Amino acid sequence: MNETNDNPQSRSNFIVEIIEQDLKTGKWGGRVATRFPPEPNGYLHIGHAKAICLSFGLAQKYGGTCNLRFDDTNPTKEDAEYVESIKEDVSWLGFDWGDRMFFASDYFKTMHEYAVKLIEDGKAYVDSLSAEETAAYRGDYNRPGKNSPHRDRSVEENLDLFSRMKNGEFEDGEHLLRAKIDMTSPNMNMRDPAIYRIRHASHHRTGDEWCIYPMYDWAHGLEDSIEQITHSLCTLEFENHRPLYDWFLEQLDVYHPQQIEFARLNLSYTVMSKRKLLDLVSDDLVNGWDDPRMPTISGFRRRGYTAAAIRNFCDRIGVAKRDNTVDLALLEHTIREDLNETSPRVMAVLDPLKIVIENYPEGEQEEFEAPYFPGQEERGTRAIPFSREIFVERDDFREEAPRKWRRLAPGKEVRLRYACLITCNEVIKDENGEVTELRCTWDPESRGGTSPDGRKVRGTLHWVNASTAVMTEVRQYDRLFNVINPLAVEDGHSFVEHINHSSCEILTGCLAEPSLAGAKPESRFQFERIGYFCVDRYDSTDDKLVFNRTITLRDSWAKIEKKLGGK
Ligand code: ATP
Ligand code: MG
């Protein structure tokens, strides 16, 4: 599992097999045309990343095309802000739709013409039952439905009513255009499904041009057909909509793509429905859709995850036909693997404790050369200044050290990474007994951090030089939820009750080595011994450096993998 693989869809799966079979038989004339069809009613999440990597990845793999298509058939929930965010996220993930960006709303006229054709063919009718009556007539899984009393309206009457629906003569809900299929079908989706409903609402693109809007099942297959898609990939919940997808296209006798369903991605400790994510945003439980704790693509990006790591994750989880939940630890492992390869090592102290090196001359300073990637000096080095006053991590000092303590304690000698050996001689406290400063001495013979006479010095600490340190703010993020599946806890509480309220901790007054001054937004680093951090793309400026903790160094995946018996 250690390969860094940057080729989406490198693995075989049942969809790859179908496509290769089709290419062999020439079923689609050798074409592979897929699409990614988000509804612009929220920001994209990691589940969408799986769908994007799959549809765009397969098009890439077979030299085909993948359309970015906005499925904007529901005017009340959709918004141009979401369209923009989706475009940004898809391109950030590394996929290019070229000139193939489409909107379902561009096809409203064609869809309407097809609906008229279906009425003319006697395969659709205007129904005028109330919502309650419609539900009662529909039956349920154990009971067949009943035909509506309006089911046998004449073609003329249906055409007239439908055109008056379109012209705005009726209120929302007064009439519905339905397909005439089979009210006794065991598949509820086939019991005369709705095709058009009345909705007096402005659309983000068509404005007030329409007051009837197509239903998803009607619209989706037509969009695929109009765009001459070959393989229409969607998630498993659409499996029992497929007969309807096929029925519409067969009745209209139009180009007919193949719908193929795959399992959606579920991730532990995460909710992944746009509606639930919207709740978190609207109730101010997070700071917007791109809060670094959100499982959105923009949240992950802000947190410091790389697009390559997300693509690798999507490739690694594969494509299956059965729903399952992927352990968040696997995503985190994939992120660490990528950052480990790509993030320069630097030093920063999050909770600084001052050290005065008493035998270092005042007013002097020297520099040590340190590699960004230890063991790979060819990837660059930088100079680390050192002088009489430095800072170490408060947690790296104990006045009363436990046995086996390898870090600083009175009388103990430790190594400062890349610099030298120091020994702690005196602890200075304030009136409350709080340690404010340590007085140490260094061994000038240990420059560079080597032990001059081979004496054993076990601990190595990260540190920063006081006079040249850069002040930074560090935001430490953790998992947003305390439970594996926040939506499945049956304790009568809403999923928001399971939010981890210590998932964001803001540390001000952190100190970083001077090479980090002016670090560019979105650049990523490993702070030695602490974790991976990313410069915040919005709040970090030349005057104020802000880091988000992307992830800690501790990887729990290896252990889990072992328990699972290896993969
Ligand atoms: P949500 O339930 O989060 O609102 P959705 O399915 O309604 O998601 P759409 O905008 O309709 O969101 O989805 C666009 C595409 O992304 C669809 O093809 C859908 O099947 C796919 N998709 C959505 N969620 C996931 C997921 N968790 N795993 C894989 N694919 C997904
Ligand atoms: Mg949806």
Image (cartoon, rainbow, N blue to C red):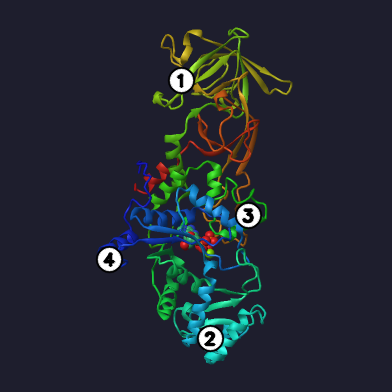
Are the residues tagged 2 and 3 within 8 Å (C-beta)?
A: no
Are the residues tagged 4 and 2 within 8 Å (C-beta)?
A: no
Quarter of the image for residue 255 reads: bottom left
Q: CA distance from mark 3 to mark 1?
A: 47 Å
Asked if residue 321 shows in the view, the reply is yes
Q: What's the residue type where badge 2 is placed?
A: Tyr
At mark 1, the secondary structure is: loop
Query: Which numbered mark, 4 or 2, is in the foreground of this view?
Result: 4
Q: CA distance from mark 4 to mark 2?
A: 38 Å
Q: CA distance from mark 2 to mark 3?
A: 41 Å
Query: Which numbered mark, 4 or 3, is in the foreground of this view?
Result: 4
The residue most toward the left is 24
Task: Tell me if residue 335 comes above or below residue 10 in the rendering.
Answer: above
Position of 242 with respect to 473 (left or right) is: left
Query: Which numbered mark, 2 or 3, is in the foreground of this view?
Result: 2
The residue most toward the right is 431
Task: Tell me if residue 499 comes above or below residue 147 in the rendering.
Answer: above
Residue 458 - label? 1
Task: Tell me if residue 415 comes above or below residue 106 in the rendering.
Answer: above
According to the picture, the residue beneath numbered tag 4 turns out to be: 26
Q: Earlier in the sequence, mark 4 or mark 2?
A: 4
Q: Earlier in the sequence, mark 1 or mark 4?
A: 4
At mark 4, the secondary structure is: loop
